[in-house]
Amino acid sequence: MKKGRIFEIREFTLHDGPGVRTTVFFKGCPLRCAWCHNPEGQSFEKETMTRKDGETVQCGQDWDAAVLAEDLLKNADIMRQSGGGVTFSGGEPLSQAEFLLQIIPILKSRGVHLAVETSGYADVETYRSVIAEMDFVYQDLKLLDEVEFRRWTGGDLKIVLDNISWLRKSGVPFVFRVPLIPGVNDSESSGGKFRAFAGKDMIEYLPYNNAAGVKYRMLGREYALKEVVS
Ligand code: SF4
């Protein structure tokens, strides 16, 4: 059985879906968004983060699906009473689809509501196999121009758009999430493009998170958007 690599488990979250939830952050992402506010979630490898005082934090822990499911289920009563559940985030959770597909049936068999936050950057079979099992999807919309998408995330926009086409037909409830990045996608014209693309589908805008710079320093990395936060 494939193990999953997780870099954080956050209990009692309120903004990653309905009710009280536990959010599981998967380590590793195929994209490299310049603004990424979870840089410790990008590498698939385990990493060490060093605080200002020299103390270190290990980032990335390997879990068996059954063990992780049991850990998540300890809050199942609170989740159920509040209409909450578990949200898979990251990093990119779909990059560990084999592991996800082991844990999903265990949680579902106990009536846990499941949501995922995804960039949509996965091959079509992987995307469909996981999304079809979800009760709710947060689908990122970062940029709608191919060249800009490549420039700021390193990826191929077509992969995301193909998956979104399927999502729209799938019947799985979803919302588009747009992280607003100063100077990248926060102009009037970008806003117009997002609204036109979303049409009748729901769209949520996330304010720019300027706390990410500290995490880059802790990883010994340069924050590409540091001029935005200074
Ligand atoms: S898709 Fe998300 S986790 Fe991956 S690099 Fe972009 S912001 Fe970071």
Image: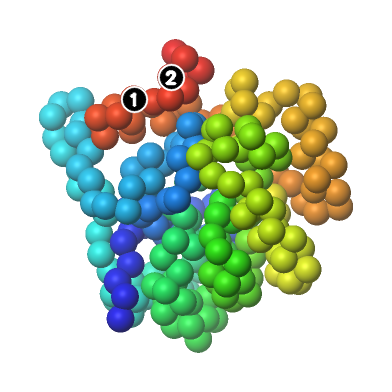
Residue 104 vertical placement versus 40 (above, below): below
Find numbered disc 1 in the image and state the secondary structure of the residue it sits on: loop
Q: Which mark is residue 222?
A: 1
Q: Position of residue 43 (x, y in %)?
A: 33, 48
**Front position in the image: 103 or 33:** 33
Identified by mark 2, the residue type is Lys
Nearest the eye: 96 or 56: 96
* 163, above or below 156, in the image: below
Per the model, the C-alpha gap separating discs 1 and 2 is 8 Å
Q: Residue at x 66, y 61 (%)?
A: 163
Q: Which residue is identified by label 2? A: 226
CB of residue at label 2: within 8 Å of ligand 1?
Answer: no
Q: Quadrant of the C terminus?
A: top left
Left or right of 14 on screen, residue 137: right
Residue 39, image x, y percentages: 38, 39
Question: Quick check: marks 1 and 2 in contact, CB under 8 Å?
Answer: yes
Instruction: Between residue 87 and residue 36, name the one nearer to us.
Output: 36
Element carrying mark 2 = helix
Compared across the picture, whether 178 is left or right of 99 comes to: right
The three-letter code of the residue at mark 1 reads Glu
